[in-house]
Image: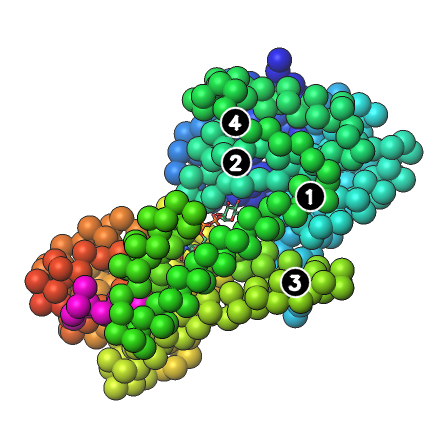
Amino acid sequence: MAMKVTVIGLGYLGATHAVAMAELGHQVIGIEADPQKLAALQAGKLPFYEPGLDKALTRVIETGRITFQPGHSESSRTADAHFLCVGTPQVSGSYAADTSYLFSAVDALAPYLSETAVVAGKSTVPVGTAKALTERLSAAAGFEARLAWNPEFLREGTALEDSLRPDRIVIGVVGGDAHSERVMREIYGPILNGDTGSAAGQTPFLVMDVATSELVKVAANSFLATKISFINAMAEISEAAGADAVALAEAIGMDARIGSQFLRNGIGFGGGCLPKDIRAFMARADELGVGSAIDFLADVDAVNLRRRQRVLDLANQELGEVAGKKILMLGAAFKPDSDDIRDSPALDIAVQLVKAGAKVVIHDPMSLAGVRIKHPELDAVQDLTSAAQDAELVVLGTEWKIYRELDAASFGELVANKTVIDGRNALPYHAWQGAGWKVIALGRNLEKA
Ligand code: UGA
């Protein structure tokens, strides 16, 4: 049955969720306070790059199932559910997550909340936040608000796919609230029934207490970050021992208990989620008096950041010193198929190289507009041929397909010195070596590989 929902906060998470809800057949009111983002969405344009989501947005706007507003209106009163999708960024100068946008969102919602509407939080939060939000909302609304937690596991680059065909749906409800569970089952019914392409009845729908549902999300991201840092730690060892971390990852990944995904070593994880989530988790565990339980996440963070330094060291080693040298950074986004530059390892390395006196030209197919605003000290060049001119060192920072498929021979004619540091282990190094390139790949010993 079609339901009516509001989606509050239309960043990567909220915009994707709003479109996904409309794709499932629901009537959606998207609420976004930022006038620029709002105007873009109202005009049918995404304020960020996400493959396939732009077309889906156009499609659902045409059906009339989605509208965008700067705030709540009378129409919110009859919604069956309100999804909280606002950001929870890292507090500046601290590891903790800033949950103030969530509290503002429930304050704004309270006057429009009905007693039967379910408020479902999707943002990533420190455990305990849902309880505090319920208290605040109930006090403001004058009745016991029904707050559920419904963490989101979508990845940028495959956001719509992950939303419509998720591995699992997790719902945290207060005191076993059957009504909240029913509403959530109804909303996700088309996914559970197999209408979106997942096999009918095969998507697990996990109902649990609110605290556990909050923890599921941070635990999942912490595990993913740990897996990446584990293989990057093995890369450090491999470099010292003359071993090959890529061959090692392949071999250990074949053990089904370990699994091969998220074992790509390189310059590490970035983005708006993993780095901030492990730090916020450490801060929350400290508050709960159990910080030592996840002390290892500090090492996960440290290993991750050391890989960036490793590229700087290798660049200095190759160039004598980087000062005054022209270095081309291929990629600025934190991962391919995204224009997100938040905590991007590629971008951070480029900035550090500039600080060390290098002349850095940075290229990226999608994120240079953001780079120019945030990092005017970098020379952001949209045309790859011009960007490569006379480079004395090339660094692959983001493994976009266009870089993986570069013709190493003709690309080699543009640069002054055919040396590349493959920060993502993504280049077909045989072809590059065959075209006369010196390839340095993190964690690898290419002579022996
Ligand atoms: C991550 C999680 O994967 C999602 O499940 C979660 O919903 C999301 O955070 C979130 O909390 O919202 P995302 O940040 O989009 O998704 O990106 P990932 O695909 O997880 O990649 C994160 C970083 O790890 C990237 O910088 C990527 O280059 C790096 N990475 C990934 C590696 O260095 N090695 C790998 O093997 C895999």
* Residue 267, horizontal then vertical, whole percent: 38, 64
The image's mark for residue 293 is: 3
What is the three-letter code of the residue carrying label 4?
Answer: Thr
Count of all numbered marks drawn on residues in the image: 4
Answer whether labels 4 and 3 touch (C-beta < 8 Å): no
Kindly indicate the quadrant of the structure image that contains residue 207. top right
Q: Position of residue 2 (x, y in %)?
A: 62, 15
* Residue denoted by label 2: 16
Q: Amino acid at mark 3?
A: Ala
> Is the C-beta of the residue carrying label 3 under 8 Å from the nearest atom of ligand 1?
no
**Which range is magenta?**
438-449
- Of the numbered discs 1 and 4, the one sitting upstream in the chain is 4
* Mark 4: few/some/many CA within 10 Å (<14, 14-19, 20+): some
Quarter holding the C terminus? bottom left
| SS state under label 4 | loop
Label 4 or label 3, whichever lies nearer to me, is: 3
Residue occupying the far bottom of the picture: 320
Q: In the image, 248: left or right of 50? A: left
Label 2: how many residues lie within 10 Å, few (<14), some (14-19) or many (20+)?
many
Q: Is residue 181 above or below residue 220?
A: above
Look at mark 4 in the image and give the residue it sits on.
Answer: 203
Mark 2 or 1, nearer chain start: 2
Label 1 sits on residue:
212
| Eye-nearest disc, 3 or 2 | 3
In the rendered structure, are the residues bearing label 2 and label 1 in contact, judged by CB atoms less than 8 Å apart? no
Dots 4, 2 in contact, CB < 8 A: no
Q: Quadrant of residue 11?
A: top right
User: Mark 4 or 2 closer to N-term?
Assistant: 2
- Residue type, label 2: Thr
Write the residue at 84% across / 43% down.
136
Left or right for 134, reference 66: right
Number of residues whose C-alpha sits closer than 10 Å to that of mark 1, classed few (under 14), some (14–19) or many (20 or more): some
